[in-house]
Image (cartoon, rainbow, N blue to C red):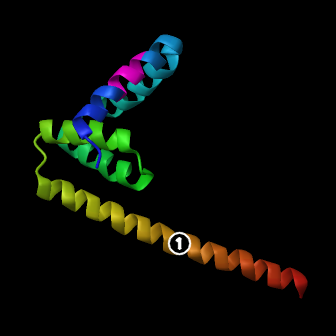
Amino acid sequence: MIDWNTYRDQLAKGFGKVATLSPGTVEAVVAAGEAGAKTGHLDAKTRELIALAVAATTRCDGCITVHSAEAVKAGATREEIAEALGVAVAMNAGAALVYSARVLDAVDALDTAKG
């Protein structure tokens, strides 16, 4: 099992190393993360719930540890986080269904070409 708090600390150190070697890259990621917040259309908790759902679907442990802490800090409850994760699970299943149809279309296209 991951020690999420230690992992989050390790990531911060690793990000610092990347920032030293490639400061523009880290600055761009930070700017992208802050850009949406500037509009003020979503509150911090909602943004963090979305981030957690995306973190789960992209299988990003670093994103999970960082955004879990931020979501709790923003007032998200375990129940709200679980609901957001439920949406992520549903979307993954939906995406798999959509791409399953695409696979069948590609297979059908092969059959048509042979025809």
Determine whether, in the image, residue 54 is placed left or right of residue 6: right
**Dot 1 corresponds to which residue?**
98
Residue 105 in view: yes
**Residue 53 to residue 29: above or below:** below
Depth check: give the residue in front, 35 or 97.
97
Is residue 14 part of the magenta span, yes or no?
yes
On the image, which quarter does residue 79 sit in?
bottom left
Q: Give, as a three-letter code, the residue at label 1.
A: Val
Q: In this picture, which residue range is highlighted in magenta? A: 11-16
Depth check: give the residue in front, 46 or 3.
3
Depth check: give the residue in front, 111 or 9.
9
Q: Badge 1: few (under 14), some or many (20 or more) residues near its Cα, within 10 Å?
A: few
Determine whether, in the image, residue 103 is placed left or right of residue 96: right
Which residue is the extreme one toward the top? 20
Is residue 1 part of the magenta span, yes or no?
no
Tell me residue 91's x, y (percent).
39, 65
Residue plotted at (47% across, 11% down): 20
Depth check: give the residue in front, 56 or 49.
56
Residue plotted at (87% across, 80% down): 113
Residue 43 in view: no
Tell me residue 9's x, y (percent).
28, 27
Which residue is the extreme one toward the bottom? 115
**Residue 3 to residue 81: above or below:** above
Which residue is the extreme one toward the right? 114
Tell me residue 86's x, y (percent).
27, 64
Main secondary structure of the magenta stretch = helix
Residue plotted at (81% across, 79% down): 110
On the image, which quarter does residue 14 sit in?
top left
Tell me residue 45's x, y (percent).
18, 42
On the image, which quarter does residue 13 sit in?
top left
Quarter of the figure with the C terminus: bottom right
Task: Please tell me whether mark 1 sits on a helix, a strand or a loop.
Answer: helix
